[in-house]
Amino acid sequence: MSGLAILGIFVVAAGLMFRRVLPALLALPLMAVAIAGVEVAAGRLTLMDLAQAVVADGSVRLAEPMVIAMMGGMVSQLLHKTGVARNLVRVGAELAGDNPWLVALGLLGVVALLFTSIGGLGAVIMVGTITLPILASLGIRDTTAAGVLLFGITLGGILNPGNWAVYQTVLQLDRAVVSQYALTIFATVALGAVVFVLVESWRSGTLRPLGWLGWSVCAVGGVGLASVGFGWLPALSPAGLHWLTGVAGLGIVASLATDQWRQRPGLGWYAYLTPLVPLILILVFQIPSIPAFGLGFVYGLVTTWTRGGINRATGAMLEGSASVMAAVVLMVGIGMLLSAVLGPTRTGPGAYWYTGAEDQVWPVVATMQPLLAQLVPQSRPAYVVLFALLGPLALYRGPLNVWGLGYGIGGVMLAAGLPAGAVMGVLMSLGVIQGVSDPTNTHNVWLANEVRVDVNALLWRTLPYAWGIACVGLVLAAGRFLT
């Protein structure tokens, strides 16, 4: 009965969030208390366990991703205040010339670059108010222009180290495992985004058939080479990577010193590398995420320094932290739900629960394992087919939406015996559907309003591509994490 009651809590919460009766910010902590409450009523947990091992432990379970989110918000605000983001978009459009297809791909890359470090609706509005008029002036259809931004935002999010930290903490995965799979998904989404731009440009008549064929070959080949490069990045010689990065660093220092000595106005080329600095520090030098973002902030501050820099830095720190507070509060709820489903961590406030019995099983896990063991796929074909069919459940704050019940459902799948890497494959692959097509995303709503189409029109225009990408991601995850 306890297992059915817990499943009922998940179903009711999903329904309330789907109908927008209860926001995820409230639903997740309430679910955590309700799930633990079932075990309290059954006599397997105490009220102290609920308060200490679920609420207190869960509140700080995702402490590292919370801090990383705040650091990322600071970098985002710094890029906004110094004009780096705005100028980067304009430079990208100018370099692409007047070819609609090249401009669309150029802006896709620029948006992806920016959103490796920035995020939030404010950043989307800042970038969108520049890119959408540029694309419209070249005859690119409204839904295609919005789709370019949606795919770019999703691409950047996949490479955002802050998102990697959530997977590491929630699923207890090594950073190398998360980063390597994320790079693979990035290449897959990049290829899908290129196909989206090609097909939609051809359908609207901005790319002729022969041009479509030629550019298709070039684009697919280019993305294929890029994916090979990304795939091999973690395996390259550390000494070689350090040497190349050191040479680049010397070039940046020399250029910065020269510009300061000559008192050259405007931003130097090195300032536009700010969004990449945390990513490079993490992948090349294996620096932990929090100091990597801190160094990225310092780099951006130094390379854009002008009079009033101290006030600008202070404002970026305060406003950047405030801009991600909704995500931080959501992580508190996610942490509580994970502690309710999987049990407390062994280093947090709930560590006392393991005292004297290191191998004891958390009651919710013991309750759910027999119930779900037969439902969780163990073979590769079953895994791919099942979760591909369940892809739409990542929409409308559904149960597989990572910013809804997704991580909680991931915890249930872990408890049922699915490998952590395979759970990551589900959440990250279906996260593409959520990031690109979900009509409940605030950036989807804003973009639809900006290009004057219904938000569901963006859903139907982008869903076939996003769903196809998710299916490829599931195939890759099955091959890598299941035997």
Image (tube, helix red, strand yellow):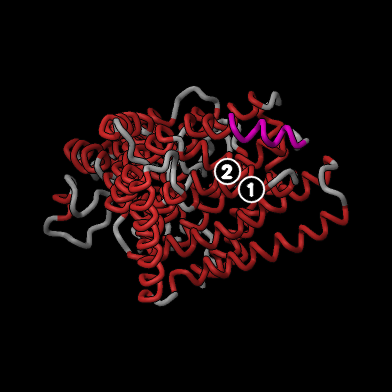
Residue 451 drawn above or below residue 405: above
Element type at mark 1:
helix
| Residue picked out by circle 2 | 91
Query: Which residue of the protein is positioned furthest toward the front in this rendering?
Result: 262
Q: Looking at the rendered structure, which numbered label has been put on residue 391?
A: none
Q: Quadrant of residue 49?
A: top left
Query: Which quadrant is the N terminus positioned in?
Result: top left
Query: Residue 34: where, in percent of width, then height?
Result: 34, 34
Q: Which residue is mark 1?
A: 95
* Dominant secondary structure of the residues highlighted in magenta in the image: helix
Q: Using residue 150 as the reference point, say whether residue 376 is left or right of it.
A: left
Q: Nearer the viewer, residue 81 or 435?
A: 81
Is residue 133 shown in magenta? yes
Between residue 437 and residue 260, name the one nearer to us.
260
Circles 1, 2 touching at the beta carbon (< 8 Å):
yes
327 left or right, relative to 383: left
Can residue 336 be seen here? The reply is yes
The spot of residue 274 in percent (x, y) is 41, 48
- Per the rendered image, the range of residues in magenta is 129-138
208 versus 240 height, above or below: above
Q: CA distance from mark 1 to mark 2?
A: 6 Å
Determine the image quadrant of residue 77: top left
Instruction: Give the residue at the far right of this rendering.
Output: 209
Q: Is residue 157 above or below residue 214?
A: above
Callout 2 amino acid: Val
For the point 30% across and 50% down, the residue is 295
Image quadrant of residue 26?
Answer: top left
Q: 356 or 65: nearer the eye?
A: 65
The residue at the point 43 percent across, 53 percent down is 276
Q: How far from the left and from the top, in percent, is residue 440?
A: 56, 30
